[in-house]
Amino acid sequence: MATDLAALSGAVIALDLDGTLVDTAPDLVGTLNVLLREEGLAPLAIAEARPFIGRGARWLIERGFQAADAPLDAERIPDLFNRFIAHYFAHIADHSRPFPGVMEALGVMKAAGARLAVCTNKRTDLSLALLDALAMTPLFDAVIGADATPAIKPDPRHLEAAVRAAGGTMDRAILVGDAATDAGAARAAGAPLILVSFGYTEIPARELAPDVLIDHFDELPPACARLLGACGA
């Protein structure tokens, strides 16, 4: 039986990007492996490095080099970061693709009157470049990256900034993510939390106790409607 999606009208659905909307691991880990090879180190398998994604490029570089048994001194990170960004920008959507059902689910929620925002620890310029390359940008009312907020997830101000930018209010907002940073931001902001089971996380999504855990994006619109309805929307 179809779920009534009327509760979505006027609400803001804020979504994480890497590991939630888009499977970016092939290009992110591919760029990390370029750096590792340049430094004479063995590359990492995607499955090994994908949990390191989600806290920004610096974290990915630090955790990646640590996993390659080559922990970094702090003074080395700026140069590696700049090299990472230059390569990644040029290869941002070589292999990255939306997860199955993403485009359809976003379209359904937009048609039901929801506002959509990207709330990501990725830089805004990188986020827009990726979304542009995948023809996803027109779906969103706001894209708020790490540089466009006072503090990044798990700080609640990141989510609050994304909801405001999309023209909504926190009492009618949901955060959809994949990792502890998303869980922390939603809980601190008092917002309902939906996590995907297939994202990038060092802590299994189920253990982060989301309000709803989904295995496919076709579950997202009815899950959002149920949560908003339960909040008295």
Image: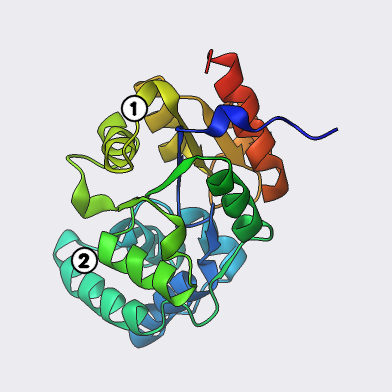
Is residue 148 shown to the viewer in this render? Answer: yes
**Residue pictured at 27% horizontal, 81% vertical:** 86
Q: Where's residue 99, x and y in %? A: 63, 61
Name the foreground residue: 30 vs 88.
Answer: 88
Q: Judge from the rendering whether residue 167 lies leftward or rightward of residue 14; answer left or right.
A: left
User: Residue extending furthest left?
Assistant: 75
Q: Name the residue under label 1.
A: 169
Q: Where's residue 193, x and y in %? A: 52, 30
Question: Which one is earlier in the sequence, the residue at label 2 or at label 1?
Answer: 2
In contact (CB < 8 Å): disc 2 and disc 1: no
Q: Where's residue 210, x and y in %? A: 58, 28
Name the foreground residue: 3 vs 122.
Answer: 3
Q: Where's residue 221, x and y in %? A: 64, 40
Name the foreground residue: 80 vs 153.
Answer: 153
User: Residue extending furthest right?
Assistant: 1
Type of amino acid under label 1: Thr
Relative to residue 87, is residue 218 depicted above or below? above
**Residue pictured at 59% horizontal, 23% vertical:** 227
Relative to residue 70, is residue 217 depicted above or below? above
User: Residue extending furthest top?
Assistant: 232
Name the foreground residue: 69 vs 160.
Answer: 160
| Colouring used for the render | rainbow
Q: State the SS at label 1.
A: loop
Type of amino acid under label 2: Ile
State which mark lies toward you, 2 or 1. 1
Q: Distance between the residues labelled 2 and 1?
A: 38 Å
**Residue pictured at 51% horizontal, 40% vertical:** 113
Quarter where residue 109 is shown: top right
Q: Around disc 1, counting alpha carbons within 10 Å, would you say few (fewer than 14), some (14 to 19), or many (20 or more)? A: some
Q: Mark 2 points at which residue?
A: 77
Q: State the SS at label 2.
A: helix
